[in-house]
Amino acid sequence: MSDHDDETQKDTSVIVVGGGPAGLSAALFTKKNGLETTVFDTDSTWMHKAHLFNYLGIGSVGGSEFMATARQQVDDFGVDRRQGEEVTAVEPGDHEFTVETDAGSYEADYVILATGANRDIAEDLECAFTDEDVVDVGVDMETSVDGVYATGAMVRPEEWQAAIAVGDGAAAALNILSTVRGEYYHDFDVPADAARLFGEQLAE
Ligand SMILES: Cc1cc2nc3c(=O)[nH]c(=O)nc-3n(C[C@H](O)[C@H](O)[C@H](O)COP(=O)(O)OP(=O)(O)OC[C@H]3O[C@@H](n4cnc5c(N)ncnc54)[C@H](O)[C@@H]3O)c2cc1C
């Protein structure tokens, strides 16, 4: 990657609306790979009602416990997680989006919607909906509005599972990273990366 690419990436900002599995997954990927990332969340995630036995790689975990680990993970990578701050509007501009909350206004190049089954913001942004009345996206989670992505429960009529939401968030983030870099982006880590990040804390 050239210095110019580095600069472009550093200046790119992403706002994620909703901090359930979809939103935090998206935020993890964008921030971990160098994009300025803010998440707004009002903590009404369905995960507080769930207990996971069907999330591959995790035997059994309470939904709230899963969320606590996920929040810690994104915090560790430096995501600006604004817990309890509700997004009231998203306004498209010429080059950026303005995201309004009760506490202030924020600018971002990309917006990832991850508001669970609540599709109000997508509707206000005039994103296209399917015949089944969910936000219309493809496998990259791009909506019909340039720069706006939709993920998780809002893009499916009923197939609501944490593992699917997490995958949606990752797909949206990778699409943004590929767009910013101008080539397909892979977030591939290897054991040496773990040693570099965690050093002596790694289990023997
Ligand atoms: C009773 C129950 C049991 C379940 N059991 C399982 C299970 O065993 N396994 C499984 O895989 N799935 C289970 N699920 C489903 C799972 O919880 C969902 O698939 C998952 O939570 C969807 O993730 P999401 O990120 O799309 O939405 P959510 O988890 O709903 O997160 C959306 C977040 O966005 C926030 N938000 C919304 N609007 C705004 C706004 N304007 N500004 C800021 N924040 C906002 C909300 O407060 C919320 O925190 C269960 C669900 C329920 C209800």
Image (tube, grey):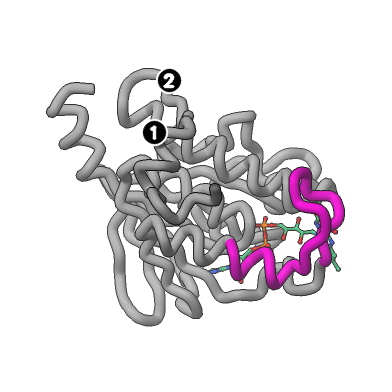
Q: In the image, ligand 1 is in what quadrant?
A: bottom right
The image quarter containing residue 21 is bottom right
According to the picture, the residue beneath numbered tag 1 turns out to be: 177
Q: Quadrant of the N terminus?
A: top left
Left or right side of 71 for 151: right
What element does badge 1 sit on? helix
In the image, farthest residue toward the left: 3
Say whether mark 1 is within 8 Å of ligand 1: no
Task: Pick whichever, 204 or 187, lies toward us.
Answer: 204
Q: Residue 5: x, y in percent?
A: 20, 28
* C-alpha separation, residue under disc 1 versus residue under disc 2: 8 Å
Q: Magenta part of the protein: which range?
A: 51-69
Residue drawn at x 61%, y 52% is 22
* Residue type pointed to by label 1: Leu
Residue 197 visible in this rendered orientation of the protein: yes
Q: Where residue 27 sits in the image (x, y, percent)? A: 46, 52
Q: Which residue ends up furthest to the top in the rendered image?
A: 183
**Secondary structure under badge 2?**
loop
Write down the residue under mark 2. 184
Q: Nearer the viewer, residue 96 or 78?
A: 78
Residue 169 left/right relative to 193: right
**Residue 186 versus residue 65 in the image, above or below:** above
Q: Between 172 and 65, which is closer to the camera in this rendering?
A: 65
Label of residue 3 in the image: none
Instruction: Name the quadrant containing residue 75.
Output: bottom left
Is residue 192 positioned above or below 154 on the image?
above
Count of numbered labels shown in the rendering: 2
Is residue 133 at all visible to an observer of this figure?
no
Q: Residue at x 83, y 65 (%)?
A: 51
